[in-house]
Image (cartoon, helix red, strand yellow):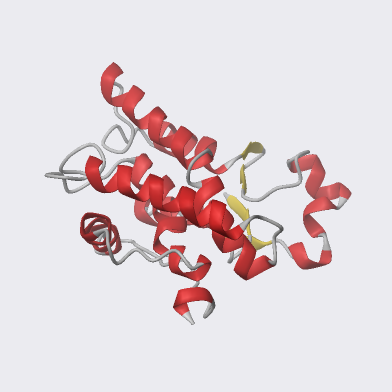
Amino acid sequence: MKLYHHPLSGHSHRAHLFLSLLGVPYELVEVDMAAGAHKAPDFLKLNPFGQVPVLDDNGTVIADSSAILVYLARKYGRTDWLPEEAVAAARIQKWLSVASGEIAYGPCAARLVTVFGADFRTDEVIGRAHRILALIEAELHGRSFLLGDNPVIADVALYSYIANAPEGNVDISAYPGVRAWLARIEALPGFIGFRKTKIGLAA
């Protein structure tokens, strides 16, 4: 099983983190995005969108970080991470959509400005980040993780860009519930961190 990734991509880190939490064997293949390797013909055969991460499981190719989380949980029968019960599954799907929406256009986008020089309106994306962080703070009230006492793939999907949000000048100090949640994820067996960049509030 190979994971094509980039170490500064939070989307890549989600997949890498979950593989490590599951304790399954895998090989990391770093994609040189600065050199345009993600747009090279060989890579586009794996993912025509030209994005990381991509999981190649002995010829079964899964692109998109959320899809990889679902695939791995189902492949290994990990109903603790992705329950089959309808309400729990629906709640997880909601948070996967948040990871692709509010997180991508909030803390992720704010970090893209500082780390990669992306052309976003800084005040707008930082404002979005704080709106979703406030909602997550409220959701975590009285809970250890997003759905309750145990982590699920939704927690993995949201972790990376929130953990490194200060790199995008998003201050998370006003969200004690979120910070405690981050610490709980970081205490899980098999946890691996998302590479830090000394920039923004993390400088």
Residue 28 is drawn in which quadrant?
A: bottom right
In front of the other: 121 or 143: 121
Q: Position of residue 124 (x, y in %)?
A: 55, 52
The image shows residue 47, relative to residue 172, as above or below, that is above
Q: Residue 189: image x %, image y %?
A: 27, 61
Q: Is residue 30 visible?
A: yes
Q: Is residue 169 left or right of residue 151?
A: right
Looking at the picture, does residue 61 appear above or below residue 106? above
| Residue extending farthest front | 123
Q: Is residue 12 visible?
A: no
Residue furthest out toward the right: 41
Q: Position of residue 34 (x, y in %)?
A: 77, 67
Where 85 sits versus 39, above or below?
A: above
Percent position of residue 154, x then y: 37, 40
Q: Is residue 151 left or right of residue 70?
A: left
Q: Residue at x 23, y 43 (%)?
A: 138
Of all residues, the one furthest to the top in this rendering is 86
Please state the total of marks drawn on the protein image: 0
Foreground of the two, 191 or 58: 191
The residue positioned 82% from the left and 66% from the top of the image is: 35
Residue at image point 31% right, 38% down: 81
